[in-house]
Image: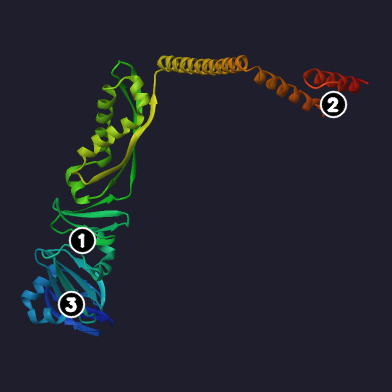
Amino acid sequence: MTRHLLSLRVTVKDGERAFLMRNGRFERVLEPGRHTLFDPTRELAVELHAVVRAEFPAERYAVLKAARPDLAAALFEAVETKADEVAIVSLDGRPTHLMAPWQTRVFWKVATRVEAERIDLAADPKVAPRHLAMVARERNTLVAEYVVNNHEAGLLFVEGRLIERLAPGRHAFWTVGRKIEVRGLDLRPQAVEITAQEMLTKDRIALRVTLTAFRRIVDPERAVGTVADVDAWLYRLVQFAIREAVAARTLDEVLAAKNALDAELRAFVRERIAETGIEVTELGVKDVILPGEIRELVNKVVEAERTAKANLIRRQEETAATRSLLNTARLMEDNPLLLRLKELESLERVVEKVGRIDLHAGEGRGLDALLSNLVRLKAQERA
C-alpha cells in the first residue's frame, strides 16, 4: 500500500482480500490485483486479510453481517454451537478446530472449503473413535482419555454415578458440562502384608505376629461401592481378627496350633467380606516374634523336654534289653540242651573269625575237642 498526493495505491495478492474503509466504515472488498484509489482528502484506509484457511474475528463479522448480509454470506462461513453441543471444523477436509458449547467462530471460505460437524453431547458422553482421531491434539481441553489394561476393570462414573464397566482398551469422553471419572481396579491377586502387631495372649505374654493375606477383586462394581480402600480396609480387618484370636489363647496354644489359628482367621475374615466383592484366597500367620527373655525361656523348656524324652527312650530300650535277657535265661534254665546249643553257636562265630576248623576232628567229640582244636589252631598261627 502506497499513498501519493491525491491517490492511494494498493496491491492485493492471491490468497488475500482487502477491506476498503472510508472514515472507519466498510465500503467494499478489493479482489486480488493492483488498485489505484482517488483519495485527495485521505479518507480511505485499506485492511489486508489472508483468506486461505484463515479465521475472521466474530465481532467484525457480526458488524459486517448487519450492514451487508449478502457480502457476509458470500465471504464467510460462521459456525455457532449451542448448549450440550460441540463442533469439529475442517478446513479443506482436514480437522482443524474443536469448538466448545456456546461458541462462535468465523472462517473465510473464498479460497477454503469449510465444513463443520456438530456433536450432541446430551445423548452420549463417549467420544466416537473417528472423532477422537480428529480432536487428538485438543483432547486435554474438552476430552478426557483413559486406557483400561487387560488385568483391570474400568468403572465409568458420570457426576459421581456409576454408569458402566468398560472393556480393556482406549476410551475417551466429552467432559463438557459434566464430571467424568474412570477408576481402574486391578483384578490380579494381590499380597497384603500385615506387619508385626504387638498383643497379649491369654496368659498375659506379649508377642508380635506378622501375617500375609492374598486377596483379589471378583465383583468390581460391588467392591467400589462398599470399600473405599481395599488394602487398608483388609489390613484393619485382619488386625482385629488376629487380636481376638491371640487374646483367647495361651502362648503354648498359639505356638502349637498354627493351622487352627490360620483357619479361624480365614473364617473370620471371609464372613465379613462376603458382600464386598472381595475374595481372600489365603490368610495365615507368617511369623510369631517373642520378646528376648520369653524366647530364652521357651528355648530352655524345649531343650528340657527333648532331654527328658531322650532319657525316657533310653530307659525303655534298657528295660526291653533286660527283659529279653531274663526271658532267655529262663529258657536256658528249663532246657539244658538249649544252653549247650547256645554255647556251640557262640563258639562257631568265634571260629569263623579265625579260620575254618573241623568240628568233628580231634581226640573226642563235643566241647572239649572243639576247644583243643581251637588252641592248636592258634598255636600254629603264632608259629
Q: Which of 35 and 60 is in front in this view?
A: 60
Q: How far apart are marks 3 and 2 (CA)?
A: 152 Å
Indicate the quadrant containing the N terminus: top left, top right, bottom left or bottom right: bottom left
**Mark 2 or 1, nearer chain start:** 1
Q: Nearer the viewer, residue 82 or 113?
A: 82
Helix, strand or loop at label 2? It is loop
Indicate the quadrant containing the C terminus: top left, top right, bottom left or bottom right: top right
Residue 28: x and y in percent read 14, 81
Q: Residue at x 57, y 18 (%)?
A: 324
Residue 356: x and y in percent read 82, 29
Whether residue 216 is visible here, answered yes or no, is yes
Residue 144: x and y in percent read 23, 58
Residue 103: x and y in percent read 13, 65
Task: Tell me the crowding category of disc 3: few under 14, some 14 to 19, or many 20 or more residues within 10 angstroms, Cα based.
Answer: some
Q: How far apart are marks 2 and 1 (CA)?
A: 115 Å
Instruction: Describe residue 74's horizontal placement relative to residue 95 as left or right.
Output: left
Residue hosting label 2: 361
Amino acid carrying mark 1 in the image: Phe
Residue hosting label 3: 19
From this view, report whether residue 87 is shown above or below residue 200: below
Amino acid carrying mark 3 in the image: Phe
Identify the residue at the far right of this view: 383
Residue hosting label 1: 173
Determine the image quadrant of residue 58.
bottom left
Q: Which residue is drawn at 7% across and 79% down?
A: 69
